[in-house]
Image: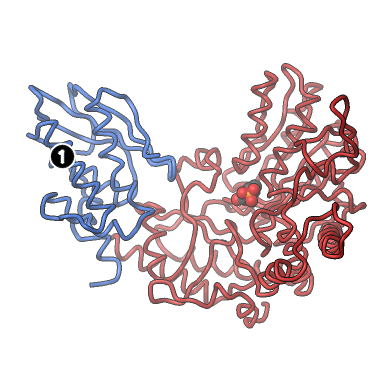
Amino acid sequence: MLDESLKSDFPTLKQKINGNELVYLDNAATTQKPEKVIKALESYYRSINSNIHRGVHTLSIRATKAYEEARSKVAAFINAEHREEIIFVRGATEAINLVASSYVRPILKEDDQIIISQMEHHANIVPWQIICEQKKAELKIIPMNVKGELLIEEIEGMISEKTKFISINHVSNSLGTVNRIEDVIKIAHGNNIRIMIDGAQAVQHLSVDLMKLNADFYCFSGHKVYAPTGIGVLYGKKELLEKMPPYQGGGDMIKSVTFEKTIYNDIPNRFEAGTPNIAGAIGLGVAIDYLVSIGIENIAKHEKELLDYATQEIRKIEGVRIIGNAVEKASVLSFVIEEIHPHDIGTILDKQGVAIRTGHHCTQPTMDFYGIPATARASFAIYNSRKDVDTLIKSVKKTIEVFT
Amino acid sequence: MSEWDELYMEVILDHNKNPRNKGKIEGYTHSADGHNPLCGDRISMQIIVEDDIVTDASFIGSGCAISTASASILTETIKGMKRTEIEKLFKEFHNLVTSEDSDARTVGKFSVFGGVRKYPARVKCATLSWHALMAALEGKKETSTE
Ligand SMILES: Cc1ncc(COP(=O)(O)O)c(C=O)c1O
């Protein structure tokens, strides 16, 4: 287990909610921010705030350097081959929309197919539906079993010459399943199909090596990896990004503009139109330093111990059913209680200071698969402890008492 | 009193466990589905209106304790009421669950929902069946709390 003193790095965690110590277990929605990240934002605005890539003055040079250093940190963090392969975006949602618009839409024709899976976040469903509708193409869904594991062996049979793209998540936000993306990537490439991996629930829990994985596109959101909201990352292979048309037009993404013709900038700037979230990118760099200093392997081990302990304890409570029982899971414990609606569970837990998520977690097709409208979801992070799990279990038992 | 009693009053817990008028009714004259996109809950109301008076009412669907109890109490309350009376009660109920200066005395049995106002995330649970009822009275087939 990680040292419990880690918790003191996070100011938000030092508070009482409804008279009880806050136990924050909604980390799959967003993580709390360490003091270092908060300080980095403050220090940016206090001492180097300035627009990047444009000025010859000292502050602009400093801000540009800090922003570009953050890009290098991200590249090293996910082991991208080239730092220009890292595009700063608002988050996973924008990254997926960018790829749908600039890579897939131009190659998509009538009757073509895009493959996603049964357990996607709406962010990895709706952008594909939009372009499928525009191009009269079709969305195909990789099925899963009741444990919440994708039936990877079915993919080969779903693929045809009409299949133009595959996009699946690395780790499911509502079930916690760690998908065997290495295998899916191999299948895609074996059929000459490009593939995107939504890593919004992955990079904070397990180490991601893009040179090894060989995914064509990969994305994540800063706010789920202890960094600020409004900053995220799209990784794309250089040879693909270089050929893609811009996603948005504006300043910074051009080399020259005349009313007759505009010459687009090189990557990554071509995909970063307008003034970006400079402070956010710097904050993300600091959050990554923080994670690296703890060690992703140590984090994975810590969170696995917590998840195993919580799973074991919640199973002992009568009437509780875990949704998502994949062999390989990360951080997420989704459950339902017989006869008690998840919203009522959420409210009673909140009264005891325990913050969990209740609802469909932006994965309605996953909920439909299980025939339920919603689940209660606890998700763990580096600062959670066995004591937090004990409080969760105690609160769940209290909830059952209130309603029976 | 334990700390959640202000929201989950005994009456609410009772109606949640033993909902009244749950199920279909024969020969209803109006019906509508209410949908809360926030949580995916759905509640349908079925009513019989004769000479501008509601003579029977039921609800179908499942939701949280707050929305179930609200639907259950609603079906009991409106029997024998005129449409204008129902509209007036809805205004008062809505006021009760959203505003500090509301009068619990005017809403009868619905006074148990006074605690909801402290839980803004739950207001839509309390009003879901009401929205479905109002839609039904207006001749609409469905409505959403958003
Ligand atoms: C698997 C997955 N994909 C995408 C997203 C969307 O992330 P964001 O809202 O930060 O763009 C989330 C966030 O909940 C997620 O869990």
Residue shown at the point (65%, 66%) measured from the top left: A304
Q: Note whether B144 is above or below A380 in the view shown.
A: above
Residue located farthest toward the top when viewing the structure as drawn: A110
The colour scheme is by chain
The percent position of residue B95, horizontal first and vertical second, equals: 23, 49
Colour used to depict chain A in the structure image: red
- In front of the other: A180 or B110: B110
Q: Can residue A172 be seen in this view?
A: no
In percent of width and height, residue B49 lies at: 13, 25
Which is nearer the eye, B146 or A302? B146
In this rendering, position of residue A47 left or right of residue B101: right
Q: Of helix, strand and loop, which one carries label 1?
A: helix
Quarter of the image containing the C terminus of chain B?
A: top left
Residue at 40% over, 57% down? A319
Q: Looking at this view, is A366 or A243 the one in front?
A: A243
Q: Position of residue B127 (x, y in %)?
A: 29, 44
User: Counting other residues with Cα less than 10 Å from the Cα at mark 1, is it few (<14), some (14-19), or many (20 or more)?
Assistant: few
- Furthest residue toward front: A57
**Which residue was labeled with disc 1?**
B88
Q: Mark 1 lies on which chain?
A: B
Type of amino acid at the residue the image marks with label 1: Lys
Q: Position of residue A261 (x, y in %)?
A: 88, 27
Image quadrant occupied by the N terminus of chain B: bottom left
User: Is residue A170 visible to the viewer in this orientation of the structure?
Assistant: yes
Res B105 → quadrant: bottom left
Q: Drawn colour of chain B?
A: blue
Query: Is A272 on the left or on the right of B80, as rendered?
Result: right
Which residue is at 62% across, 61% downward?
A: A331
